[in-house]
Amino acid sequence: MINFESLKQVLRPNLGHVCVVTALALVIIGLEAIRTAPTPSWYGNIALKQAIFTGVALAVMLTVALPHPKVVANAAFGLGLVTLLLLALLLVPGTPESIIPRINGAKRWINFPGLQFQPSELAKIVFVLALARYLRYRENYRTMRGLIPPLLITFVPMGLILVEPDLGTSMIFLPVLFAMLLAAGAKIKHLVLIIVLGVSLMPMMYPLLKPHQKARIVAMIRQVQGDTRLRNTTGFQSYKAITATGAGEVTGYGKDRAEVILKFNALPEAHNDMVFAVICARWGLVGGVIVLGLYLLLIASMLAVAALNKDPFARLMVVGVTTIIFTQVMVNVGMTVGLLPITGMTLPLISYGGSSLVATFVMIGLALGAASRRPTIMSRPSFEFTTAGNS
């Protein structure tokens, strides 16, 4: 049943609407980029499919925005348990491929009737909710022992996702933990500890990577060094992405010529992970800068929602989901231009795919819901001086 009072609050003009309008602008650019990208005929009309996904995603966004942040906070730990069970299900040996298919060597999806669902997309959002609930009124995270629960909340889903393997999504968790602890007021030495921990984990995680993931890292390093020997093997996708990105020059070549360039370029996953290269081929450097500018506006608007919100949970929640979007954009663009290894990270709101699109609009819906409320302030009041005289 629809709560019309909540609906009125959400529809009332607020800063969250800037986030929604900016997101829709990125979706429109994405639809046109997907139309430009060459895809196999058996994919069908993927631009039309993406438009349908957008309608579903907007409905989900509105649904997520309606509950009060207090309701979302109460559901956080329950959602976290369900999400961990779904992630664990992916790793159960002997599961039929009709239920959990192996795609490109990874088991990341669960097939439901008429739907293919990626639990890691849900996990990164629920992780933010659980962490925000833990941090909202606590001060013990300012001690070394108090950091243990936030680290567990982070590393358990991160480890399960890494084993799938899904290196790209697992890379999101530590930046989000850092940003949320920073927003919660953690001590600088503890934030430095997280940075050191993240850096020290890199060589420890390397042996856990699959051979194709290691090959991509090696290909990226050699490419940065100017070594061209892997261009036709493990470095093929990265090389083609860089070539397509530069092909549009300053202003691009329009749809027809861009289609010819991209078809000749034979860039894998042009409609998905490498869609930023399609944008640059179609609209050139100008188009790429405009897209990055829209992302900057989206991120700034969401951070403003967080800064203006007095509810500790809502503030931390919005900081967390904003960091997810920021990290995804940086990783995707970084791998497209050859500065990071290929990880399979989608470009939010632009890459083709229902799970990614719905997940991003869920995050925007959470920000919209936070922006629509004037919460009861439950945090401690700031210290106030009094001028009252002694009686």
Image (cartoon, rainbow, N blue to C red):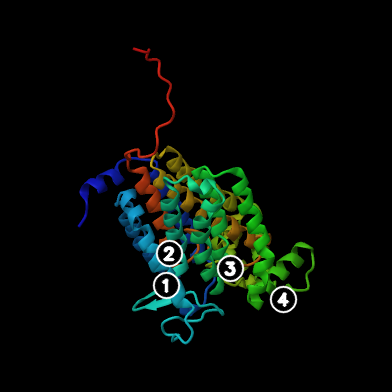
| Cα distance in 3D space between marks 2 and 4 | 35 Å
Which secondary structure, mark 4? loop
| Cα distance in 3D space between marks 3 and 4 | 23 Å
Q: Quadrant of the N terminus?
A: bottom left
Q: Nearer the viewer, residue 17 or 341?
A: 341
Which mark, by number, is residue 86?
A: 1
341 left or right of 26 in image = right
| Cα distance in 3D space between marks 1 and 3 | 18 Å
Residue 102 image point, x, y percent? 51, 81
The answer to whether the residue labelled 2 contacts the one labelled 1, judged by CB atoms less than 8 Å apart, is yes
Q: Quadrant of the C terminus?
A: top left
The answer to whether the residue labelled 3 contacts the one labelled 4, judged by CB atoms less than 8 Å apart, is no
Residue 194 image point, x, y percent? 61, 53
Residue 271 image point, x, y percent? 53, 67
Mark 4 = which residue? 232
Taking the spot 71% from the left edge, 66% from the top edge, the residue there is 220
Q: Residues within 10 Å of mark 1 (few under 14, many from 20)?
A: some
Taking the spot 40% from the left edge, 32% from the top edge, the residue there is 381
Precedes in sequence: disc 4 or disc 1: 1
| Cα distance in 3D space between marks 4 and 1 | 37 Å
Position above or below: 369 against 218: above
Residue 336 image point, x, y percent? 63, 62
Q: Nearer the viewer, residue 338 or 275?
A: 338
Q: Nearer the viewer, mark 4 or mark 1?
A: 1
Which mark, by number, is residue 122?
A: 2
Mark 3 = which residue? 167
Q: Residues within 10 Å of mark 2 (few under 14, many from 20)?
A: many
